[in-house]
Each structure stands twice: as C-alpha cells, then as structure tokens.
Image: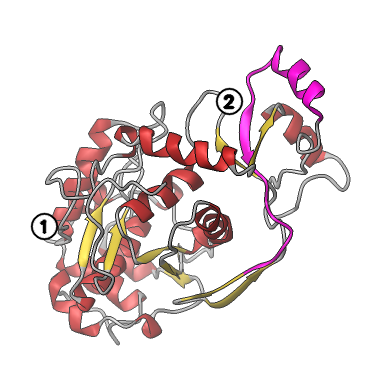
Amino acid sequence: MTDKSGPAPSPAARRGRFAPTPSGLLHIGNAFAALLAWLQIRRAGGTFVLRIEDIDKPRSRPEYAEQILDDLRWLGIDWDEGPDIGGPYGPYEQSAREERYRAALARLERDRWLYPCYCSRAELMAIASAPHGLAAEGPAYPGICRGLTAEERQARSLAKTPSLRFAMPEHEVTYVDGIAGPQRFPAGAGGDFVVQRADGIIGYQLAVVVDDADMGITDVLRGWDLLDSTPRQLLLLKALGLPAPRYAHVPLLYGPDGRRLSKRHGSVTLRGIRQTLRSPERLIGQLAHLAGLLERPEPLKARELTPCFELSRIPQKQVIVSENMLRLLSVP
C-alpha cells in the first residue's frame, strides 16, 4: 500500500477528523466528541477533516448524512476537507473508497494475516452462552476456524461464503492515550476480528485505519467506547506498514440515573435540541463545562473556546449530565 489518494501532508501538520456514521441522527454524545476533536485541531492550527463512515450501506442513509452536516454547521463546527467541499485526500465517504480497502485486504492476505471464518452469528452466540464461553466483556472470537486445514476450508467453502478475520499476534499492545494515559492490552485482546464480512462488506476496523492513513490523520480524538478498538487498529496499521496517529478518548456522557445517555432520556439528538434552542451557544457552554474547559457553564460560540482547550483538562471518568442541563435542553 504505497500509493495514496493525494499528496503526502507535511510531517509537521496536525490533522484531525470527525467521522460519524449516517445510520441515525447526531446526538449529544456525538456533539461532545466532535466539539473536542475540532477544538484540539483548531487550537493547534491544523486541518480538520469530516469523513462520513457509510461503508455499511444497508444501515446508512443519505438523509442522515445531510442532517449531520447541518447539525455540525449549527454548532459552529467547520471543516477544511469533507464530502461537501472535497480536498486532496478524498473521497471523504467510505462508500466511495472500496478500492483502497481491497488493496489493503490483498496486502494482508499476501502477508498471511488473514484467514477465512465459516462461523455463523448463531454459532458464536451459542458459544457465548455456554459455561466458559466467549469473553465476558464481549463476543471475543475463540479462534475456531484459525487452525482449519486447507482441506477443511475447501469443504466448508462449498456450503458457505466465509468472512475474513485478522489473526491477532501473540504479543501485548501498549500505547499512551492522550486522555486515558498509558494503556496495556494482553496478547490477542478481543480475539481475531472480522475485516471483511461474509456479505462482502469491509469491516470498520480495516476501513478506519486505511482512511486515517490515506488522509494523513495525526490526531484521533473520539469516544471512550472506542478505546478497546485501538489495539486492533494499531496492529492493522503495523501489518500494513502505515503510521499510527495519536489517540485520545473522551469520556462518555451519562444521565442522572448513572446510565449512558440514549433515547430513554428523551430527545437527546441535535435535531431535537435545536427545536428548543434558537442558537447553539448555551449547548456549547454546557458541553465545555462537562469537558472541564469552563469552571461554570456560560453561553459561548465554539470558536471562543479555542484558547481554553487542553487535553489535560478533560476528565478520565464518565461524565454525569445533570437534571438541570437536561431541563435546559428540554430533554425529559
């Protein structure tokens, strides 16, 4: 994978991104991560990229992508490169980048990082429900198909189209997160993972590392729920001979009941909030306060927060959104 989709960016240039999936409306947690990712790059004087991660075509909707762009503009978040304005490293929609992912798959196959998996979701769920089944933290793949012989693979391929899995190497992965601090993951953490589904759709982990490398992304700031994806992405980058960005994971937002904000708390989508607030300044001030950038919430435009941004100010634990804030946003 030596070819690129555009000229190589300057090594000194800071490049960040926000990469939403258009399978639903932008919600307050997305806005929290997007605002902080944007502030990080604007504070550094770098380039901010908007990428639409619509590789899973059955779940993605063009109307959601359009609404996401409109909601970001309402917040005061702009971008230097993106699907609507182009740029030197496009296309900026994953659905138009399949050729790049196929090239990455070919290299991984050539270097023997991949193997076919014939296990169905039902089979894996049955293993997970059995005593001593899959890992408690999630459906880690137990490597059932990793040791199949060529003859066994040939026989199974007659009955079923396989997915492709990345064979996790037998060594631990360490890195220093910009917010969470030093991270250490044991060998094989999470199990071998899918890089191409049986229906031909490219896996998220592969698509995102290829995109970040092609677009010269130096800084990835995203939600804490993706922290466990980082060792997989670091290993893919190494296997493909690609540079790794700096990662920072912001805390997730939780309601007063201690559970992650979702539709059960009412209209936490940006479209819903916009029906209550005429302008975004009150929401921006509240989000900045939750992120530790302001001692108390006050209405501000996004660009006014740029001098306040420091990764060290962002908390390392889940953030509780108060009843008062939910009431301010008219979220029941």
Quarter-of-image position of residue 309:
bottom left
> Mark 2–mark 1 contact, CB under 8 Å?
no
In reply to whether residue 29 is colored magenta, the answer given is: no
Residue range of the region highlighted in magenta in the rendering: 149-173
Q: Is 189 situated above or below 95?
A: below
Any part of residue 173 in sight = yes
Outermost residue to the right: 131
Task: Give the amino acid type for the residue marked by disc 1 in the picture.
Answer: Arg
| Quarter location, residue 155 | top right
Residue located at (53% from left, 23% from top): 199
Q: Residue at x 31, y 59 (%)?
A: 216
Decide which of tag 2 and tag 1 comes sooner along the chain. Answer: 2
Q: Does the magenta stretch include residue 171?
A: yes
Please name the residue that numbered disc 2 is placed on: 198
Question: Which residue is tagged 1?
Answer: 278
Q: Can residue 203 be seen in this view?
A: no
User: Where's residue 115, x and y in %?
Assistant: 67, 36
Q: SS class of the residue under badge 2?
A: loop
Q: Residues within 10 Å of mark 2 (few under 14, many from 20)?
A: some
Above-or-below relation of 275 to 175: above
Q: Position of residue 52 (x, y in %)?
A: 30, 44
Q: Relative to the observer, which residue lies in front, 141 or 250?
A: 141
Q: Compare residues 210 and 318 and report the one nearer the observer.
A: 210
Quadrant (top left, top right, bottom left, bottom right) of the C terminus: bottom left
Residue at image coords 37%, 55%: 213
Q: Distance between the residues labelled 2 and 1?
A: 46 Å
SS class, disc 1:
loop
